Amino acid sequence: MLLSIVLILMMGFFAGQIARRLGAPPLIGMILVGIVLSPPVLNVISPEVLGAADELRTVAVMIILMKAGLGLDREKLAQQGSVALRLGFLPAMCEAIAIAIAAMVIFQFNLTTGLLLGCIIGAESPAVIVPGMLRLKSLGLGVTKGIPDAILTGSALSDVLLLLVFSLLLNFLRDGGVEQITLFGGFTVNTVYLLPFQVMLQVILGVLFGYLAARLLVLLLTKQNWTQNAVQDTVIAAGLALFLVLIANTLPYFSGYLATMAMGFFLIELDAPLARRLRGGFDSLWVVAEIFLFVLLGASIQLQTLEKVLLPGILVLVIGLFIGRMIGWYLSTLGSNWNWHERLFLLPGNSAKATVQAAIGAIPLAQGIAGGEIILAIAALSILITAPLGAWSTGFFAPKLLTKGEVDPTKVTVATRTILLAAVDTSSLATAVLTKVADLARRSHGEAIVLHVVNTSNLSDIQRLQEQAKQILSDIRYEFLVVNGAVPETIIHIAETYQVTEIVMGKRGHQPLGILIGSVSQAVLEMSSIPVILLENRKR
């Protein structure tokens, strides 16, 4: 089992990085590794890990939905009005109906089995869509009109709807008729008629439990200070989110995934500093969870079942996407302020399939439903085609179709690389400057540029500075530069060239000729658009 975990992590990571360097999304490499390691090919993943695949996928989806909730923007969602709500119902419903009709014609399915297939294929993948939308938010693409937020919310709502309908249809096919339930007073009613109320109940209770969970987290982590660092905050938040998902599986009266997303959303409103800390923590968890999710996704794909339905299966997917889903997208954005470029972006940004199809695609076959093998094959086909294509096309088309706006760092993690410039001379302040840079670099996991500007060559002094830097910055990645030129201008030029985040220098150091450089520090302060930290030698 441990060997399987090591193979999944190592091979999944490097395959993802190879795909990234080739210009493709990392998940493509991870899925391919899963296919290679799966039982039909190399068969090196242990049965214990394969048996726990559903649970591991649940954890991964919980993490990505928590990330989605922590990135939602209430003002942008309110600005969109009903667009996000319509995106949660209309595209998925239209695609499911179009797939059902196509399956009835191509595979001779009855209406119920066709709709069952439509519910499986129509569900959107949070594992593909959420990272893509959060990346767009971090780049500012589409944020002015709240397009990534609308897609994130709509995706979560559509999965709630389709999973409910899927369960209802599965019970109908398995039991051979419409399920009846008895209400108070002895009245009986078909569960079909209760579907709208079930959807409303799942959504309302999911949002409510998400809010209560967010309040509980703020109470425990902020007001009562049960934790001491961001890692502990993340562990408690992840445990609570996973608890919501597990309870929802046992008591299916609310959507656990929607509750998880709502918890992240309400945390921004209740305690923005806590939400920021958790955002970084869940980013770290996703690094590992992403590998397990997509490698196990690839391992679950039944390649041998694809041969029979390859071409007709692709036809069904095309009909569902280009007829059903596009009608739903048009109706969802009707009357909105989206232009045709932004509406067209829904094609790459809101059509990926992966997680839900892997989780429920095999259930009809396991339950003995007629046509279950075909349903599983088309579910696998939808993953192989739309997951990598959706991940790639989102990044490729977003800059071409969406308008770039201002990034809100309170809603997403903005990746920054900390590079500190230590401008040192041969005075005693060099030690203080290097020590300060080392401290700042350790706090921010940053790197350093050590710069010594000379007008005259003095090799012994330069060697002494190099030895000081090597000793003080022994655990910091740094580069030592010796440059000739005018001191202030050279410092500014190097800082801009290396895109440093801060300049650290002494205020009263001495040049080799004994000239005070107080004027140098003043000149750098006046010329630099980069923050400058001055260390003063108080010895007189």
Image (cartoon, grey):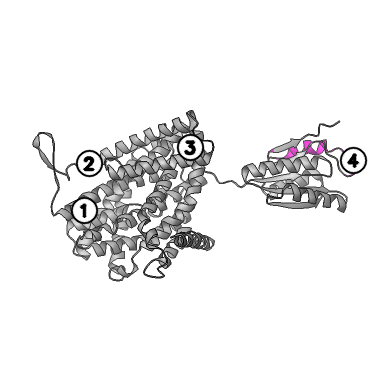
Q: What's the CA distance linking mark 4 and mark 1?
A: 86 Å
* Quadrant in which residue 103 is drawn: bottom left
Three-letter code, disc 4? Gly
Indicate the secondary structure of the residue bearing disc 2: helix
Residue 336 seen from this side: no
Determine crowd level at label 1: few under 14, some 14-19, many 20+ residues with C-alpha closer than 10 A. Answer: some
Seen at 12% across and 41% down, the residue is 189
Kindly check if marks 3 and 2 are in contact, taking CB atoms under 8 A apart as contact. no
**Are the two marked residues, 4 and 1, in contact with CB atoms closer than 8 angstroms?**
no
Q: Calculate the distance from the C-alpha at mark 3 to the C-alpha at mark 2.
A: 33 Å
Q: Which residue is mark 4?
A: 514
Q: Is residue 509 visible?
A: yes
Residue 383 in picture, x, y percent from top left: 36, 60
Q: Mark 1 belongs to which amino acid? A: Leu
**On the picture, is 139 further left or further right than 129?**
right
* Lower position in the chain sequence, tag 1 or tag 3: 1
Q: Which residue is mark 1?
A: 170
Residue wearing tag 3? 275
Query: In the picture shown, does residue 189 fall above or below 308?
Result: above
Instruction: Say which label, 2 or 4, has the lower sequence index.
Output: 2
Task: Give the class, few, some or many, for how many residues have Cα within 10 Å of label 2's Cα (few <14, many ≥20).
Answer: some
Amino acid type of the residue tagged 3 in the rendering? Ala
Span highlighted in magenta in the image:
512-531
Q: Which of the two labelled residues, at mark 3 and mark 2, occupies the earlier sequence position?
A: 2
